[in-house]
Amino acid sequence: MNIEACPKIELHLHLEGAAPPHFIRQLAAEKHEDIGGIFAANGDYKFSDFRHFLKVYEAATSVLIGPEDFYRLTCEVLQQSAEQGVIYTEVFVSPDFCGGCDLAAWQEYLAAIEQAAAQSEREFGIVAKGIVTCIRHFGPDQARKAARCAAETAGDFIVGFGMGGDELQGKQGDFAYGFDMAREAQLHLTTHAGEWGGAESVRQAVFDLKVERIGHGIQVINDPNLVDELVARQITLEVCPGSNVALGVYPTLDAHPVNDLRSAGVKTTISTDDPPFFHTTLGQEYRQLADTFGWTSKDFTALNKTAAEAAFCSAETRQSLLERLEKT
C-alpha cells in the first residue's frame, strides 16, 4: 500500500489555520487590507516562535469577515484534505473568528460552513464534522460565549467542543464552566494540553475538564504514572508531529515521543494542526514517520482505526469509516 495515498482520518485540524497563504493574500487584496507583514519573501507565513505564530494566525483570520469567506475557506481546505487521501476530518472552528461569539452571527457563519462541507462530501467524498473551539488566551468569560454557541448549534455537524490558544495562559480548570455547558449539550470534549504546559496540563485536562481526547498531549511522556492513566481511561491523543517540530517543542522528529507513546499503549492519532503554517501535509507526516520510526502500512491502518474509533461522529458514520479502512 502507498502510505501517502492510503485513506486517512484526521482529528486535529484548525479550519482557519489551514488557510493557504495564497488564499489569505487573495482575500486581503479583495478587501484592500494590508497584512503583508505576516508573509515571508517566498509567500509563506512568517513567525519566530509560538506566541508570534498566534499573532500571525489571528492577523490571517482578520480578513475572514463573513460567512461567504468561510464558505470559500471550507471548500478550499476540504479539497486539499481530500487530495491527501483524507476520508474523514474534524475541523476546529472558533466562534470568536465567526462574528465575535454572537450567537445569531455564528449561526450564519456555521450555515455557510455546513453548506461547504456538504458540497465537498458530494464532490470529493470527504466527510467533515465541526468542533467548536474557544481561545484560551481570550479568557474564561469569552470561552463561555463560545460554549454557548456550541451548545445552541450541537447536532449532526457540530459534534464537539474544545480549546486552543496559548496553553501557558491560566489553567485548564479555569474553563470548566464552558466545558460543563458543552457536556450538558451532549457534545464530545477535547482540549489542547501537553504541548507547552508539560504533563501537568494533561493532568488538568483529564481530571478538571474530563475530556475524551487531548490535542497534542505529548509531554505526558514525562510522567509515566499519567501515561498509565491515559491508557486506563482510553483517552486518545491527537498528535501533530510536524507542528511540534516546526514550533520547537522537539528539535527533530526522531526526538519526538509519538513512537514511545504508542509503545506504551496510549491511543494515538496523527494530524497536521495548521498545515500551511508548518509546511506539511498529512501524506508528508505519514512518510516522515515511516522513514523515522520504521512504521509500515500496518501501523498506519491501526492509527486510522484508532482515529475512527475516537472520532466524535455517529455510530453509523464510524462504521462506514471502518468499512472503508478495511478495504485498504
Image (spheres, rainbow, N blue to C red):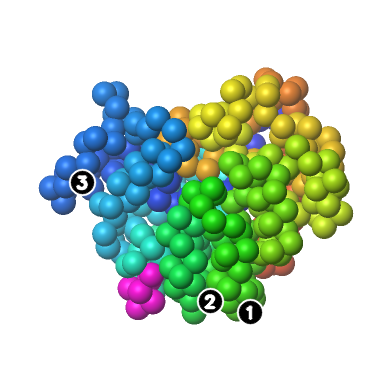
The quarter holding residue 304 reads: top right
Q: How many marks?
A: 3
SS label for mark 2: helix
The quarter holding residue 44 reads: top left
SS label for mark 1: helix
- Viewer can see residue 295: yes
Query: Is residue 24 rendered magenta in the image?
Result: no
Measuring from the top left, give residue 157's x and y in whole percent.
53, 68
Q: Residues in magenta?
A: 101-106
- Viewer can see residue 150: no
Amino acid beneath label 3: Ala
- The residue closer to the viewer here, 115 or 48, is 48
Which residue sits at x=49%, y=49%? 166
| Residue of label 3 | 28
Amino acid beneath label 1: Glu
Measuring from the top left, give residue 289's x and y in whole percent.
67, 27
Relative to residue 101, is residue 197 depicted above or below?
above
| Residue of label 2 | 151
User: Horizontal placement of 146 versus 35: left or right?
Assistant: right
Relative to residue 200, is residue 294 depicted above or below?
above
SS label for mark 3: helix
Circles 2 and 1: CB distance less than 8 Å?
Answer: yes
User: Horizontal placement of 121 versus 53: left or right?
Assistant: right
The quarter holding residue 327 reads: top right
Measuring from the top left, give residue 277's x and y in whole percent.
42, 36
10 Å crowding of disc 3: few (<14), some (14-19), many (20+): some
Looking at marks 2 and 1 on the same chain, the residue that comes earlier in the sequence is marked by 2
Which residue sits at x=59%, y=23%? 251
